[in-house]
Image: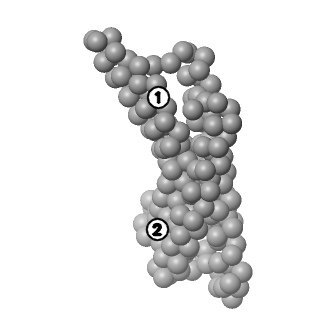
Amino acid sequence: MMESNGLNLLSTVIYLAVIFIAAIISVLGSIWIMAFLTRKSIQEKKEIVQRQNINTAMVLGAFIWTVGHLCFETIKPIMNVWYINYPAGIRLATGLLFFLGVIASLLVALVSGALIVFLALKLLMVITRDIDEWKEIKSGNIAVAVVIGVTVIVLGMFIESIISSISLALFNSLNLI
């Protein structure tokens, strides 16, 4: 009985470690996505830290929330099934394969998140051709920052279930869960 509790604890620690890794990947990926999309217009670190530009911070926050939420919702069903099915632990080979699958799912979610953010911004910029959104954000236009942030978040919310379902189906087809 005591050994089983130890394995349950180990399983819980592994579960939390994977979720923590997912959070780190999501935040770093979000920052990279914004840096890529604004590479000619905004220097995020300078705008947020030195100039204390709330607009840039709001847009980056929307990117982080969207990509983080997408990554979390992608791996949550997989991790929950794993946690329920293998509370007493699994063989090392199965565990490593499962872990690599979770990392692959995270990367799919991250790439999908980047694509969603990119498409959301391109769609918004096509609709508002006469506005240079990044220039407006840099100059302090909070309304533009709010519209960009909300656009990114809403599109991410619509896409999250699709990405999560694809990831879960992939795990099922590989007989990992």
Q: Going 52% across and 78% down the picture, which residue do you hit?
A: 147
Q: Secondary structure at mark 1?
A: helix
Q: Position of residue 8 (x, y in %)?
A: 36, 22
61 up-or-down from 125: above or below: above
User: Is residue 122 visible in this depiction of the protein?
Assistant: yes
Residue neighbourhood size for the residue with mark 2, other residues' Cα within 10 Å, grouped as few (<14), some (14–19), many (≥20) = some
Q: Going 38% across and 28% down the picture, which residue do you hit?
A: 12
167 or 147: nearer the viewer: 167
Sequence-first disc among 2 and 1: 2
In which quadrant of the rendered image does the C terminus lie? top right
160 up-or-down from 19: above or below: below
Amino acid type at circle 2 is Met
User: In this rendering, would 159 be left or right of 64?
Assistant: right
In this view, the residue farthest toward the bottom is 130
In the rendered structure, find residue 58 and report the number of the disc placed on it.
2
Q: Position of residue 102 (x, y in %)?
A: 58, 36
Q: Secondary structure at mark 2?
A: helix
- What is the distance, in whole Å, between disc 2 and disc 1 at their CAs? 40 Å
Q: Position of residue 163 (x, y in %)?
A: 62, 53
The residue where tag 1 is placed is 85
Image quadrant where residue 95 sits: top right
Residue neighbourhood size for the residue with mark 1, other residues' Cα within 10 Å, grouped as few (<14), some (14–19), many (≥20) = few
User: In this rendering, would 117 be left or right of 1?
Assistant: right
141 or 72: nearer the viewer: 72
Q: Going 50% across and 48% down the picture, which residue do you hit?
A: 72
Q: How many marks?
A: 2
